[in-house]
């Protein structure tokens, strides 16, 4: 009798606990319209997607300072901005880890990292984690390519940068690069999603 009473309670507690390990929203899917956001950049200024009127889209990278996988991909994120910013698809990097759980991802640490790595793109602090939850970002890095559609942006690609997190030269599927090149050529993205790999985002309240 006691067993039958406690099983539903245990199941409920487990369900509540698991909610803390994932975003509250499933996030955007390919084809969805992205709601604009305003986040503080490492220079103290607020940045939103609407700031740039001449872009064709954005390469949005949810990343951080501390994850080994994010560190391995850092140079490739920098390279994506160098390759595509002048063509209308600049990089916007977003750091969403809870700084209480990951002090190395604090705003001050973000400023130091951006300076030492010479970021030429915004590095935004998603302190409330609202933007990461809206996008459905789960990993660092987690990439989203969004394409301008009038005054809005639609998701064209979600997932990994490429298929080799350890060695850039060994990657034979460069998902983000291919997606942006296809968009620039006026084509549909042939691989609109690929599983993101990396550390899980450190959510608040876990």
Image (cartoon, helix red, strand yellow):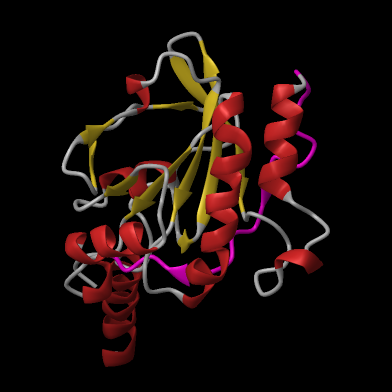
Left or right of 201? Residue 76 is right
Q: Quadrant of residue 87?
A: top right
- Asked if residue 123 is positioned above or below residue 200 in the image, the reply reads above
Left or right of 88? Residue 27 is left
Is 198 or 185 nearer to us in this picture? 185
Is 38 or 10 nearer to us in this picture? 38
Q: Main SS type for the magenta part?
A: loop
Task: Residue at 30% x, 63% y: name it.
Answer: 97
Horizontal and vertical percent position of residue 54: 47, 14
Q: Quadrant of the C terminus?
A: bottom left
Task: Residue at 33% x, 76% y: name it.
Answer: 14
Is 105 or 96 nearer to us in this picture? 105
Task: Residue at 50% x, 60% y: name it.
Answer: 141
Task: Residue at 76% x, 26% y: name it.
Answer: 188
Q: Quadrant of residue 95?
A: bottom left
Is 176 or 191 nearer to us in this picture? 176
Residue furthest to the top in view is: 150
Q: Which residues are magenta?
A: 186-203
Left or right of 84? Residue 90 is left
Residue furthest to the bottom in view is: 2
The answer to whether residue 128 is seen in the rendering is: yes
The answer to whether residue 102 is seen in the rendering is: no
State how many labels appear. Answer: 0
Residue 90 belongs to the span the image colors magenta? no
- Asked if residue 78 is positioned above or below residue 73 in the image, the reply reads above
Horizontal and vertical percent position of residue 187: 78, 22
């Amino acid at each position: 009798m006691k067993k039958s009473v406690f099983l539903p309670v245990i199941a409920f507690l487990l369900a509540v606990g698991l909610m803390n390990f994932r975003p509250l929203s499933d996030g955007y899917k390919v084809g969805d319209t992205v709601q604009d956001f305003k986040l503080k950049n490492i220079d103290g200024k607020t940045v939103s997607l609407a700031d740039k009127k001449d872009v064709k889209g954005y390469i949005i990278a949810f990343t951080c300072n501390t994850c080994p996988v994010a560190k391995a991909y850092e140079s490739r994120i920098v390279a994506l901005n160098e390759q595509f910013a002048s063509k209308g698809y600049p990089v916007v990097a977003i750091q969403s880890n809870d700084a209480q759980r990951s002090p190395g991802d604090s705003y001050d640490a973000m400023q130091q990292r951006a300076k030492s790595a010479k970021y030429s793109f915004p590095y935004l602090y998603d302190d409330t984690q609202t933007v990461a939850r809206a996008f459905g970002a789960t990993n660092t890095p987690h990439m989203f390519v969004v394409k301008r559609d009038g005054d809005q942006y639609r998701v064209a690609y979600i997932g990994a940068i490429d298929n080799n997190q350890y060695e850039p030269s060994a990657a034979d599927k460069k998902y983000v690069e291919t997606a942006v090149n296809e968009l620039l050529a006026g084509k549909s993205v042939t691989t609109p999603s690929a599983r993101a790999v990396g550390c899980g985002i450190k959510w608040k309240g876990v």
